[in-house]
Structure formats: C-alpha cells, structure tokens
C-alpha cells in the first residue's frame, strides 16, 4: 500500500510486522511472508543503519524492533497502523497476528 | 597530531574529526565515545559514532577514512592497526523526540571536535535506559554527571516530554546519592 514511499514491498511488510510484533527475528519474517531470507536481512540492515529499527542478540537469535528512539517513530507508527486498518481480516490473521499467549509443549495446535 | 600518536579515544576522535573537516565533511561525534571523553575514560569506548552533517557522498567519506587507515567491514570502518572503529550515524541529530541544535566544540591541538554536550550525552544514555532498562547506560549517564557539568533540570524536562518520569526519578535518586557530601 505504501510501497511507493518505502521503495520496497519487503520493507513495507517488515515495518508493519515489527510495529505489530516487536522483537521478531529475520527467519520468522521471511517464513511468514515467504520472502527470501537474504532479502529480509538486507532490508533490516538498511533500516538499522537508518536508525529506524534496532536489534539485539538473545542467545543466538538477533531480534529486531522499531527503534523506540527513532525521532519519527510515532509518525511512522501512525502511518503503518492506517495501512493495517485498510487490510482485510484474513490478511491480518494470516500474516500479522501472532499467538503470544503461552502454550504447553506437545499440545496440538 | 597523527593517528599513530593518539593515546586515548578523545585524541582518536579529534584526529578523525579534523581529517573529515579538512575534506569539507562536517561531522558530530555522538554515542559512547562522548561518555568516554566526558568521564576521562572511566568508561571506555573504542567506537567513534560520527553523524555526518549535510549531503555528503559516502564515496567521499569512505575515501577520507581509508586515508587514515580504516577499512570498511559491513557498515563499520575498522582501523587496520589500532583497536578503533568508526560508525556513521544517520541524521537527524536527536535524543528521543528532541532535535539537537546546539553541540559542544573542543578546539585543541589544531583540531576541532564537535560532539554532544554533556547534557545531551546524558539524555542519549538515558534513552537506552528508559526504553530497554539498560543499567550500563544508566551508570554511564551517572558517570557523565559526576565528571561534567550537566543541566539536570533540562534532563528532567526532556524526560517528562518523553513520558519517562518514573525512570527519571530513579536516575535522580542515584544522582542525589552521588552528589551527597557528608
């Protein structure tokens, strides 16, 4: 929806995903959207060098989030939330809503 | 002063900054190196985070840093001989939502080093403490307060605008303990 602004569809989806799911990792994002992992990592690198996102290691996994110190964070979030509001529920459920409540190991889905 | 003669992070910063200025690349030092400078290296950083002012082609910066012995490794420039790195920070110069318009200038040994003021350096560290509970950043902010002149009221007002008064209070309490004299 805002690809013309972000310059890349992957970047648009990554940003929206991170607004809704802070502390996500690259392979999770690539699997979710069926994007190439390298392409996702490259976009995350670009966003990080622009201070839009930041990352930290947890164990061996690098987790990304929108940098809370990014000076345009509120404006960016408002734009992305508007994009999200235009999506149909099916797309939201399939790509952006992640189960975050606990689930016992071994329990069927 | 040559890079080979540098003894501490401040001197490295001065040499790199002046070298860039000589090539019309205006720059401002930010991040942990400012903490090192304001605390006389009680906190040690080997990273020089420079924000480049204005539109400068990366090619020009790359070539200037190469002349000083830096090699580009991913997004960072590492020195071939010394344990020092340069990272280029994207503009604008901000702490949280606040746009920084005034910087400090250290003019020494025929060099000009522009850097965050001690007060903005404290805000910069506190931003990491506010958002990620990073205790190291809180300690660094306190170290700067101990060794440099910091406008605590300004930090307080900024914290209020950032909606972080609860955490500012913790910082303020520790700062009070620090300045309490028997």
Image (cartoon, coloured by chain):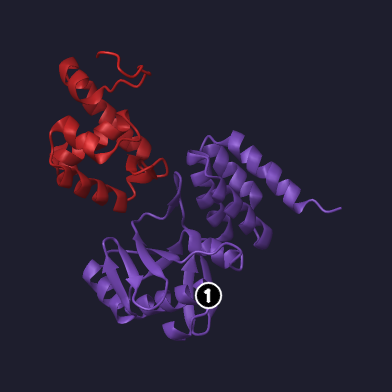
Which corner quadrant holds the C terminus of chain A? top left
Q: Secondary structure at mark 1?
A: loop
Task: Please provide percent x and percent y for residue A104.
Answer: 36, 17
In the image, residue A6 sits, relative to residue B81, either above or below, namely above
Question: Which quadrant would residue A76 be assigned to in this image?
Answer: top left
Residue pictured at 46% horizontal, 73% vertical: B13
Chain B drawn in what color? purple
Is B107 situated left or right of B175 in this image?
Answer: left
Q: Which residue appears at 18% of the width and 21% of the height?
A: A94
Q: Which of the pair B129/B105 is nearer the observer?
A: B129
From the viewer's perspective, is B100 left or right of B139? left
- Of all chains, the one bearing label 1 is B
| Residue, far right | B182
Q: Position of residue B110 (x, y in %)?
A: 49, 85
Q: Quadrant of the N terminus of chain A?
A: top left
Chain letter of the red region: A
Query: Viewed as shown, does residue A59 lie left or right of B170?
Result: left
Give the residue furthest to the top. Answer: A108
In the rendered view, does B3 fall on the left or right side of B150? left
Quadrant in which residue B17 is drawn: bottom left
Residue A103 drawn at (x, y percent): 35, 17
Taking the spot 65% from the left edge, 38% from the top edge, the residue there is: B169
The answer to whether residue B125 is above or below residue B27 is: above
Q: Residue furthest front?
A: A106
Residue B96 appears in the picture as rendered: yes
Image location of residue B172, percent across then percent down: 67, 43
Residue at the disc numbered 1 = B8
Which residue: 23% across, 25% down? A96
Q: How many marks?
A: 1
Q: Residues within 10 Å of mark 1 (few under 14, many from 20)?
A: some
């Amino acid at each position: 929806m805002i690809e013309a602004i972000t310059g890349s569809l992957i970047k648009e989806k990554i940003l929206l995903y991170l607004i809704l799911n802070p502390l996500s990792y690259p392979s999770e994002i690539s699997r979710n959207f069926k994007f190439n992992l390298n392409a996702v990592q490259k976009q995350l690198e670009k966003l990080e060098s622009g201070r839009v996102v930041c990352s930290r290691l947890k164990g061996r996994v690098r987790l990304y989030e929108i940098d809370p110190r990014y000076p345009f964070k509120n404006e960016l979030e408002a734009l992305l939330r508007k994009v999200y509001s235009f999506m149909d529920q099916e797309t939201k459920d399939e790509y952006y809503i992640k189960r975050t409540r606990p689930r016992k190991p071994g329990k069927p889905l | 002063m040559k890079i080979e003669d540098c003894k501490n992070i401040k001197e490295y910063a001065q040499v790199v900054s002046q070298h860039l200025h000589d090539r019309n690349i205006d720059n401002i030092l930010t991040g942990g190196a400012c903490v090192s400078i304001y605390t006389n290296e009680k906190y040690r950083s080997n990273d020089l985070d420079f924000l480049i002012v204005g539109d400068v082609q990366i090619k020009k910066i790359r070539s200037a840093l190469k002349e000083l012995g830096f090699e580009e490794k991913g997004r960072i420039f590492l020195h071939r001989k010394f344990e020092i790195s340069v990272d280029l920070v994207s503009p604008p110069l901000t702490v949280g939502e606040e746009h920084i318009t005034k910087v400090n200038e250290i003019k020494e040994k025929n060099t000009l080093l522009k850097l965050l003021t001690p007060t903005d350096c404290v805000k910069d560290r506190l931003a990491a403490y506010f958002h990620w509970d990073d205790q190291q950043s809180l300690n660094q902010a306190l170290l700067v307060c101990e060794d440099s002149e910091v406008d605590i009221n300004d930090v307080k007002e900024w914290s209020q605008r950032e909606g972080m008064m609860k955490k500012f209070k913790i910082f303020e309490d520790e700062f009070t303990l620090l300045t309490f004299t028997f």
